[in-house]
């Protein structure tokens, strides 16, 4: 059987881009070890391995390397450090890393030591240029002392200094002919900062201004810039995508009509299929049948290199499952992504698909990703006739409050609302318990999956760079200090919805017994984040009312009232609590006895259930209104 | 404004063409034209930046409308009553999750049904914009897109009824409690279940007689669209909802295990399954719509024409309104359904009476497709004060029916039994999506007695079958001026046959019934549907054409090129949720064939909705969802753009393509 390659290079790129955009890889990338400097080369002493960085980086350039492993940091001031190179060299490359910059920080990631993506503290900068975070830095003409080329990021996705940020790059190396003459320029296929695409398909004609090399070659190391001041890196992951692709041998398919719920509802060894045949491709519609039934396809796949492969399966109108060489790998309902270790060469892929509901052509997809291979789709056949138009909701001129499901921590939050502000900071909120789900900056919401066609997915998707918070009910009446914080809102909690103020901002209202809870997030005019104000009015039912300001894997108090949340993901600034003055008591003689207000509570970090919780506890029995305020910035 | 001018120009263009070449007048518009003499559709201009996919309409005193939309917006519409309306839209609220119904709150503000809750919208600062979005009750959802919440409507006690659609694309269609149920909600937010077995209950209402009815869509467990009388404890047929009938508060005693894939007429099942409620009125699928939506009762007391006290039922897929007259016989609701008005611009979801007997009609097709191809529309239906010649209402009699007319009939014509034709049929109750017409049998008209005033005719009909739908066709009846009925067919669901005097002896009727039963039903075969490759071809087809239907009333290909005289093999696959066929007609004849198909009534299904017309070249059968068929024929010798359509009623206007013979 003659095989044709499925992809021209650009088709492969489209697939890769789609997968990266979805931010869910099928197999982990290769990790560059930062346990030591063994996989790195540097000419200076300014780089050191540590376990993390701390310091008042939000406001100063001070970066302190903590003992440990996994992070490499340059703590030398600007002008004094040397650059850092990977020992590995690369052509086409997918790269992901995390970096941290202190206030005013400046560095860069140079592909092949030559083509720079700029790292810069561009927090809150309104109009970013090529020299801001995510910019493709300029090239330079020394004789004329001027720069050229250089591409600004499409949006400023920068977070506050002192927070870990993420950079993802898909890079295509320059191509050369047999004589070594360049035939194709290097290209940044995609650059994403904190999950937001900032560059797409940017061609670079040669080395950036501060590159280590001025020539162009097929392979070179990644360079991390260290001569512009403190910066730290971690989670350096990469894949050289040079092994080609998975090829398909023939597919044997069979169609068994019937009403089945799951893939094992029919013992196919006992019945004859209605339709059976062979095809070159894995086509969900190959049988020509589109009623209710089971579609079974056995496909030969040829993988170019040995290693761990990831498979993902998805399906319309019913479940689908994939096995490789008889071994279960993935099922739409029970883990759509599975891993399998394969030797180089031929393997047998079995796909079982139940078609139960109508509404479109039979359709399932199987995707594969392996070592040195870009993610690739194995299924072929009918594509959807039209790609849906993108329906966006912007909040540029007015505050938006939009109900709609929100995907969070792998599940659909069904009582979610998303709030967008003209300042450009937005959040998603769980009305069921008052938990914050997401914070983001940039564009507001993509409503396509709710408003296009029938809206089959019903989810609203943040368009900017979102931080996912550990969602938990905001208020609880815990009987003791060690009672775990509940995962669900108190069943007695009555949701009252929200009221929109003159500025359009919603105030969420709920009630627990006699106590009314009001919660609102006010955007800061600078765009740095939100001020959250929570008010409790009335007495709590039994125990002390406690408010969870935030829960995270880790919460550290960095300065008075300043907390760094999670793995340096965002800042929480405590602004204080107030308790309304109690009403004076009238003595029998008619004079008033002034009652002293109780002391103002302060937040406490609690270590419980494997996470940190920042909790404010009010005394039991207070009828007076209790207010607390804090900032969330990132 | 641009849009308005364009549509104006388009009308001018159509008129010009029609004047020049009358044979090309789109026949589909013939009935629309006749209907518009009596009921005129006034389409409103909607600003380009408003996506008015209507979910609910409320007429508010002061000649205002409040319209809520699928995108969660609520709009004030002012000027909707003007003779030549140019309505003004002002936003009252937004950000809701698919608002599908609206009702005035007695204390001010408005109740809205949205996906996860019923909400009380209030304007507390008097700026005509809602600022308080108060949760009245939260409604369980699993996340499926198909979990709509419809309503709310008030009970006499001031509580609310809300109907909850079943889910799609999940292992069960009721993954969370109360999916497929009618619920009652107090103003304080306490929710109790009323009835189960609902599938897609887009609308319900409490009539002036104090009875609740809901409209249902054909689908799994539902043989055809219908109206059902709903009382506490009823079960209407969709199995999934019974997953929750054991929960505290459930008034329904049936359980999942009681419901099998019966594959029998629903009334037969009901005889051995107490608690299964039969429909009051079937709305034959494809004939009187394909996806019933809103129900309104004409309480205008003549302000909207001669049908006071009757119900109007909208339809999304066919952009039409059906009229229903109800009566209660032996304590059971039943009645007749008639076509009333077609030709709306999009798929009707909501209807609302204006202050002066106008009917506001809000539409959208949002991914399902509709005969009126616009994605959304808002219109007003005005009575022109002319009375159409119609069957006004039909009552069941011990031995037939009394048909009332809106105008005196020509007595001689009306007294002739041959002016009528009656056929009985029903639908199966099973898990599969929809049901064909089953147990179809003639019911001969034995005798007709016309009333002295000429306003009614009593028909003695043999072979009446309880619970069956009786198609009553009165195509021979004319008024005094010789004009035929505007709509000559009615569908009476005969749940109960009243006792009383007969006009023809029972013996004679029995004899006629036996004759009718003995009439052999010959299977209809069309020579234009060759399922086998013609032997004379000798070899295989020269061109193999694969066509698929797509959601939204589309074929996946709209232009197919062949050469004259080529041997063609055409395969149609129907992955859509609706019924479709493929009919090839001569150039310019597609719409004419579509119109003839529309007039076939319940015979249509048996004949694949392909009219006996020389304009038809070849066709497939009507394909059930998820089926496929291959036909063989030779391409015409004359080059030209031959039109192919889906001739399933209501589809031909938009579901078309060209077979180009070169």
Image: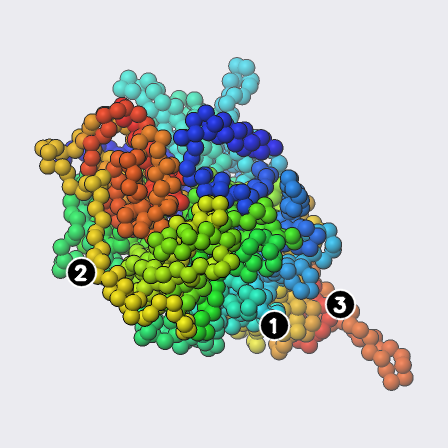
Is B118 placed above or below A4 here?
Answer: below
Of all residues shown, which one is farthest toward the top? A143
Q: Quadrant of residue A204?
A: top left
Task: Specify the label residue B157 is tagged with.
Answer: 1
Q: Secondary structure at mark 3?
A: loop
Q: Is residue A575 visible?
A: yes
Is B656 placed above or below B432 here?
Answer: above
Looking at the image, which residue is at 58% across and 53% down?
B304
Q: CA distance from mark 3 to mark 1?
A: 42 Å
Looking at the image, which residue is at 36% across and 56% down?
B417
Q: Quadrant of residue A375?
A: top left
Q: Nearer the viewer, mark 3 or mark 2?
A: 2
Report whether A170 appears left or right of A176: right
Chain ID at mark 1: B
Report whether B625 appears left or right of A281: right
- Residue B646, percent across and down? 34, 41
Q: Residues within 10 Å of mark 1 (few under 14, many from 20)?
A: few
- Residue A365, percent across and down? 30, 46
Task: Specify the label residue A632 is tagged with.
Answer: none
Looking at the image, which residue is at 67% across and 50% down?
B64
- Residue A391, percent across and down? 50, 42
Q: Nearer the viewer, residue B239 or B124?
A: B239
Q: CA distance from mark 2 to mark 1?
A: 56 Å
Question: Are the residues flagged by discs 3 and 1 in contact, CB closer than 8 Å?
Answer: no
Chain ID at mark 2: A
The quarter of the rendered structure image containing the N terminus of chain B is top right
Q: Nearer the viewer, mark 2 or mark 1?
A: 1
Residue that carries the numbered disc 2 in the rendered image: A267
Residue that carries the numbered disc 3 in the rendered image: A580
Chain ID at mark 3: A
Q: Residues within 10 Å of mark 3 (few under 14, many from 20)?
A: some
């Amino acid at each position: 059987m003659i095989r044709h390659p499925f992809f021209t290079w650009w088709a492969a790129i489209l697939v890769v881009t789609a997968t990266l955009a979805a931010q869910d890889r099928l197999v982990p990338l290769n990790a560059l070890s930062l346990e030591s400097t063994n996989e790195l080369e540097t000419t200076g002493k300014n780089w050191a391995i540590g376990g993390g960085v701390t310091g008042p980086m939000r406001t100063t350039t001070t970066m302190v390397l903590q003992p440990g492993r996994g992070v490499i940091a340059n703590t030398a001031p600007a002008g004094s450090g040397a650059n850092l190179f990977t020992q590995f060299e690369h052509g086409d490359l997918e790269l992901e890393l995390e970096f941290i910059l202190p206030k005013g920080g400046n560095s860069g990631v140079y592909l092949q030591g030559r083509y720079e993506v700029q790292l810069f503290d561009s927090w809150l900068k309104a109009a970013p240029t090529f020299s801001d975070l995510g910019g493709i830095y300029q090239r330079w003409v020394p004789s004329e002392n001027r720069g050229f080329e250089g591409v600004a990021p499409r949006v400023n996705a920068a977070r506050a200094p002192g927070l870990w940020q993420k950079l993802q790059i898909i890079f295509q190396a320059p191509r050369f002919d047999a004589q070594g003459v360049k035939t194709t320029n290097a290209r940044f296929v995609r650059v994403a900062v904190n999950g937001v695409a900032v560059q797409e398909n940017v061609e670079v004609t040669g080395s950036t201004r501060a590159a280590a090399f001025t020539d162009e070659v097929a392979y070179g190391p990644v360079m991390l810039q260290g001569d512009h001041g403190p910066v730290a890196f971690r989670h350096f992951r990469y894949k050289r995508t040079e092994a080609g692709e998975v090829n398909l041998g023939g597919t044997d398919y069979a169609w068994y009509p019937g009403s089945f719920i799951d893939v094992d509802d029919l013992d196919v060894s006992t019945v004859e299929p209605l339709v059976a045949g062979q095809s070159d491709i894995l086509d969900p519609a190959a049988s020509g049948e589109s009623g209710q039934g089971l579609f079974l396809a056995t496909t030969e796949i040829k993988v170019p290199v040995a290693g761990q492969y990831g498979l993902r399966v998805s399906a319309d109108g019913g479940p689908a499952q994939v096995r490789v060489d008889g071994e279960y790998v993935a099922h739409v309902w029970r883990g759509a992504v599975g891993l399998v270790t394969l030797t180089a060469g031929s393997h047998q892929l079995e796909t079982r698909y139940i078609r139960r509901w109508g509404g479109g052509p039979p359709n399932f997809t199987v995707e594969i990703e392996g070592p040195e291979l870009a993610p690739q789709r194995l299924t072929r056949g009918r594509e959807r006739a039209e790609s849906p138009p993108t329906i966006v909701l912007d909040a540029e001129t007015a505050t938006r409050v939009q109900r709609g499901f929100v995907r969070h921590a792998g599940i659909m939050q069904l009582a979610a609302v998303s709030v967008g502000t003209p300042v450009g900071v937005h959040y998603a909120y769980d009305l069921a318990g008052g938990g914050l789900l997401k914070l983001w900056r940039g564009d507001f919401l993509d409503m396509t999956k709710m408003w296009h066609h029938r809206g089959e997915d019903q989810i609203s998707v943040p368009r900017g760079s979102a931080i996912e918070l550990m969602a938990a009910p905001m208020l609880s009446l815990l009987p003791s200090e060690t009672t775990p914080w509940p995962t669900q809102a108190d069943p007695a909690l009555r949701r009252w919805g929200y009221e929109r103020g003159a500025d359009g901002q919603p105030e969420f209202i709920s009630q627990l017994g006699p106590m009314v809870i009001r919660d609102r997030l006010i955007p800061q005019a600078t765009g740095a984040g939100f001020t959250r104000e929570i008010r409790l009015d009335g007495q709590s039912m039994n125990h002390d009312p406690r408010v969870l300001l935030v829960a995270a894997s880790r919460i550290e108090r960095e300065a008075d009232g300043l907390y760094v949340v999670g793995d340096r993901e965002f800042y929480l600034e405590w602004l204080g609590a107030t308790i309304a003055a109690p009403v004076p008591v009238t003595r029998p003689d008619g004079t008033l006895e002034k009652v002293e207000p109780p002391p103002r509570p302060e937040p406490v970090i609690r270590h419980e259930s494997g996470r940190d919780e920042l909790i404010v506890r009010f005394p039991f029995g207070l009828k007076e209104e209790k207010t607390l305020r804090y900032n969330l910035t990132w | 404004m641009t849009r308005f001018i364009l549509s104006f120009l388009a009308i001018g263009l159509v008129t010009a063409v029609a004047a020049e070449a009358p044979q090309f007048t789109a026949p589909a518009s013939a009935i629309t034209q006749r209907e518009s003499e009596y009921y005129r559709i006034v389409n409103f201009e909607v600003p380009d930046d408003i996506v008015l996919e209507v979910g609910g309409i409320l007429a508010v005193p002061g000649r205002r409308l409040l319209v809520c939309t699928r995108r969660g917006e609520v709009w004030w519409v002012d000027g909707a009553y003007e003779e030549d309306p140019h309505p003004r839209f002002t936003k009252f609220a937004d950000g809701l999750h698919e608002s599908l119904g609206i009702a005035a709150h007695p204390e001010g503000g408005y109740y809205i049904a949205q996906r996860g809750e019923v909400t009380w919208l209030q304007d507390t600062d008097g700026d005509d914009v809602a600022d308080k979005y108060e949760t009245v009750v939260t409604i369980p959802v699993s996340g499926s897109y198909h979990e709509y919440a419809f309503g709310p409507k008030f009970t006499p006690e001031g509580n609310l009824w809300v109907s909850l659609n079943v889910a799609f694309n999940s292992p069960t269609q009721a993954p969370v409690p109360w999916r497929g149920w009618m619920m009652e909600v107090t103003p304080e937010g306490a929710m109790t279940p009323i009835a189960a077995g609902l599938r897609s209950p887009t609308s319900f209402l409490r009539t002036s007689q104090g009875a609740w009815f809901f409209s249902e869509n054909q689908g799994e467990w539902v043989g055809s669209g219908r109206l059902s009388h709903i009382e506490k404890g009823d079960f209407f047929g969709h199995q999934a909802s019974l997953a929750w009938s054991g929960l505290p508060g459930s008034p329904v005693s049936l359980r999942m295990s009681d419901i099998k894939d019966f594959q029998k007429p629903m009334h037969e099942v009901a005889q051995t399954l107490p608690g299964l409620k039969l429909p009051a009125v079937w709305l034959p699928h494809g004939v009187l719509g394909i996806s019933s939506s809103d129900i309104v009762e004409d309480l205008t007391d003549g302000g909207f024409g001669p049908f006071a006290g009757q119900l109007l039922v909208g339809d999304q897929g066919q952009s039409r309104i059906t009229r229903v007259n109800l009566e209660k016989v032996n304590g059971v609701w039943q009645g007749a359904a008639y076509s009333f008005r077609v030709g709306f611009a999009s798929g009707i979801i909501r209807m609302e009476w204006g202050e002066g007997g106008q009917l506001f009609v809000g539409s959208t097709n949002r991914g399902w497709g509709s005969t009126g191809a616009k994605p959304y529309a808002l219109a007003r239906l005005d009575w022109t004060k002319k009375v159409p010649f119609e069957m006004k209402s039909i009552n069941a009699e011990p031995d037939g029916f009394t048909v009332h007319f809106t105008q005196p009939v020509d007595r001689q014509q009306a007294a002739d039994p041959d002016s009528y034709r009656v056929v009985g049929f029903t639908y199966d109750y099973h898990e599969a999506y929809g049901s064909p017409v089953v147990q179809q049998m003639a019911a001969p008209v034995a005798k007709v007695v016309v009333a002295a005033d000429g306003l009614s005719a009593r028909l003695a009909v043999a072979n009446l079958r309880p619970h069956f739908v009786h198609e009553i066709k009165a195509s021979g009846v004319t008024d005094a001026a010789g004009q035929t009925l505007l709509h000559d067919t009615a569908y009476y669901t005969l749940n109960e046959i009243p006792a009383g005097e007969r006009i023809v002896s029972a013996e004679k009727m029995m004899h006629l019934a036996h004759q009718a039963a003995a009439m052999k039903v010959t299977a209809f075969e069309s020579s234009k549907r060759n399922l086998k490759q013609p032997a004379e071809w000798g070899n295989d087809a020269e061109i193999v054409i694969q066509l698929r239907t797509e959601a939204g009333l589309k074929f996946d290909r709209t232009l197919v090129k062949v050469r004259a005289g080529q041997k063609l093999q055409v395969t149609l696959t129907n992955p859509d949720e609706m019924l479709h066929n493929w009919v090839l007609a001569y150039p310019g004849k597609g719409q004419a064939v579509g119109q003839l198909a529309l007039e076939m009534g319940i015979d249509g299904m048996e004949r694949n909705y392909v009219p006996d017309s020389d304009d038809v070249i070849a066709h497939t059968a009507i394909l059930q969802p998820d089926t496929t068929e291959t036909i063989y024929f030779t391409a015409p010798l004359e080059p030209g753009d031959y039109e192919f359509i889906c001739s399933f009623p209501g589809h031909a206007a938009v579901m078309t393509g060209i077979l180009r013979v070169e």
